[in-house]
Image: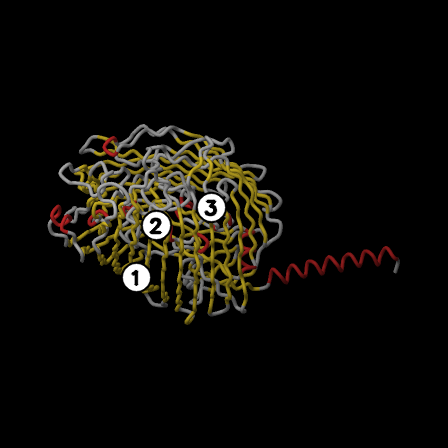
Amino acid sequence: MTFKTERTLGLLMALMFIINTATVYAQNNHIIRLLDQESSLPIIGATFTYGDQTGVSNVDGNIEFQYRKGVSMNFSHINYGKWSLIDAEVLQMIEEKVFYRRPIIVNLYPITVIALRKNMSPIENVTLDYQERLAHDGASVLNQNPALNSIRKGGNYGFDPVFRGFKYDQLNVVLNGAQSATAACPNRMDPPTSQMAPNMVDRIEVLKGPHALRYGTGFGATINFVPTKLRFVEENDFYGRISNGFEGNGTVLRNEGQLGFNGKKHDIAVFASWSQGNDYTAGNGQTIAADFNRGSFGTNLGFKLSEDNLLRVSATYNVARDADFPALPMDLREDDTWMFNARHDASFDKDHLSSWNTTVFASFVNHLMDNLLKPLDPRMLNASTKATTYNYGARTEGVWNFEKSNLFAGADFRREGAEGTRVREFLMGPNAGNVVRDNAWQDGQMGKGAVFSEYHLIFDKTRVVLATRLELNRANVDEPTPEFTQANGDTQVTQFNPSFSIGATRNINEEITLGLWLGRAQRSASLTERYINYFPVGQDPYEMLGNPQLDPEVNNQLDLTLNWQNKLTSLDIDFFAGYLQDFISSVIDPELEPRLPMSPGVRRFINIEDALNLGFEFNWVQQLTSGLQHRVGVAYTYAQDLERDEPLPEIAPLDLRYTLSGHYMKGKLLPELTFRHVLEQSRTATEFGETPTPSFSLLDAKLAYNFTKSGRITVGVNNIFDENYYEHLTRSVRGNNQPIFAPGRNAFAAINFVF
């Protein structure tokens, strides 16, 4: 045998070995487990088609198939909809041996999803990198969307979200569909979103309008902070993450980390974060008071009691110290919050009953604010307020599946209360040496109990959703003050609040879906609106007086949605119109005397007979050539007080965002350029002293590089051209009516490791 013949035979044998290896790999049966993204329980009865292979997931959520190169896999389930995986996603699923899917009931509603994790499909979600996990305030993450703005009373802390002009308790802010926290500060230095730790959140779901009623009365929207999913593995393992960040303007330092230990029946994780910052410089060179110190520490414990039973327990401790609020008469000195949550999920292999989940929760906030850090000259008095709140309750819900319909039904209960005292020590004037104590909350309490249901009915390409919520609301105070009862009379109140919604989505073809939603939500007044006792908690310096006799406000809203989506582009358009009845607002009452000599007067909470709220949101994402993708977002809200014939206050102007991003070096290099333009807001409420806000334009740049599979570094510059601007919803500096300007040019860097 010649050398040439031997070489030929060798090549043929090598080729046969490669072909045989590939054939063996392709013929290997792969078992993949389909799990619910929210509960980590198995998805039972999901059908799949993969080339000439078909199957159904069993009681453990398992499917079995042989890999086929270049073939897409298609799935279908009555609760999880239809979805497809391309070849690369099938390979990733085989490597991870598990696939998580979110129930379709979430996607049905007019919704914005903000995901705090990497996602293979940027078409579906607005994706954030690990830099956003470093954020110390949940609302700051929300502000990346043009439809979500924030009321800002300080430079770096306590952002209070506003969506379509709805704010405060008009937005139902919950953690994992159930838990919330009640702001202890009368001025809301600590809104519920500030208590949500971004580094332990998987995504944020903004369920628009009064349509999603299972998680509470979403009068204007429900903002649901969904925690990271539990990760069970066949063999015991460790995992973790550590991130560090720095911002030059304001010398902001951020750190966060997570360490977990998981196995077949347990997932135990602890997490921590700490952020601190100093005063920053605005575009005009002005120094803005913005000191803050913020930390979050906690644990998530997951236990698989059996294949069909899952228990999840979490505890979080949030701490804040010495945060500047230049728009308020006091600054935050101490804020300590404990949040506890336990949830049990059970799945059933029954004819109709599919699953049942029950959650119990509790939140406790201790807050101290004073004016000792304020540069007052002359200093007429020292003032401080110590306040506490509690918020506890439970929620239970079952899911029933029928041939062409689903039923979700359950009940929930929540009780909240607040108490606090303001202490005023007079240093000058005729009252020098005297100390006066003011009861802020009068130990106000409120309880809400409700039953709810949601029924899904499928007609060919149309899915109809009927939602109902019946809620009983009771409130009272334990320590009513004479001046409050003299102005208001009886403080005890009981109200019944029915809410309804009907909606339908229709698939016009494989790419276009239309939706029409009609909802009516009824909400009782909050503790502040009912029982605040001569405190300046509004947007102007007037003291506010609660009104226990407020009627519930009603939002009658229509949403019309259009979604067009294929592999390269996604277009979402939402038109909304709301007719508001008995809308809760306030009016100056000249017959009431303020408690502070520097206050211009007193406002009393009242009901406005009717108001109008309408607008639109537009979001378009498209994959371009050369590894590029661009995204356009526009949001606009028009709101009018029909009784006083003037604009409603605190309505953000039209906001436009354009982002151009790249994906290079097999996903290692990720450049991004973002342009934002906000129009002038000339529609202002003179009743509340609002003034027009000028337009502004911003340009930000960011570059991320994955230098290893476990490490990423991010650098960038916000406000590249050092624009001097302020948001319309930002309050003015206390005492001189000057706006709190936003940060000027700001360079930042962050580094992240996962293992």
Instruction: Identify the amino acid type marked 2.
Output: Asp
Q: Nearer the viewer, residue 733 or 242?
A: 733
Image coloring type: secondary structure
- Quarter of the image with the C terminus in it: bottom right
The crowd level at tag 2 (other Cα within 10 Å; few <14, some 14-19, many 20+) is: many
| Badge number at residue 277 | 3
Q: Which residue is at 43% across, 57% downward?
A: 37
- Left or right, residue 300 beside residue 95: left
As measured in the structure, the alpha-carbon distance from the residue carrying label 1 to the one carrying label 2 is: 30 Å
What is the x, y in percent for residue 222? 32, 49
As measured in the structure, the alpha-carbon distance from the residue carrying label 3 to the one carrying label 1 is: 42 Å
Q: Is residue 240 above or below residue 504?
A: below
Residue 148 visible somewhere in the drawing: no
The crowd level at tag 3 (other Cα within 10 Å; few <14, some 14-19, many 20+) is: many
| Badge number at residue 190 | 2
Dividing the picture into quarters, in which one does residue 638 lie? Answer: top left
Instruction: Identify the amino acid type marked 1.
Output: Glu
**Residue at the limit of the structure toward the bottom, as seen here:** 306
Foreground tag (1 vs 2): 2
Residue 302 visible somewhere in the drawing: yes
Foreground tag (3 vs 1): 3
Instruction: Identify the amino acid type marked 3.
Output: Gly
What is the x, y in percent for residue 385? 29, 51
Q: Which residue is at 23% across, 30% downward?
A: 646
Which of the two labelled residues, at mark 2 and mark 3, occupies the earlier sequence position? 2
Please report contact status of discs 1 and 2: CB closer than 8 Å, yes or no.
Answer: no
As measured in the structure, the alpha-carbon distance from the residue carrying label 2 to the one carrying label 3 is: 17 Å
- Left or right, residue 509 beside residue 584: right
The crowd level at tag 1 (other Cα within 10 Å; few <14, some 14-19, many 20+) is: some
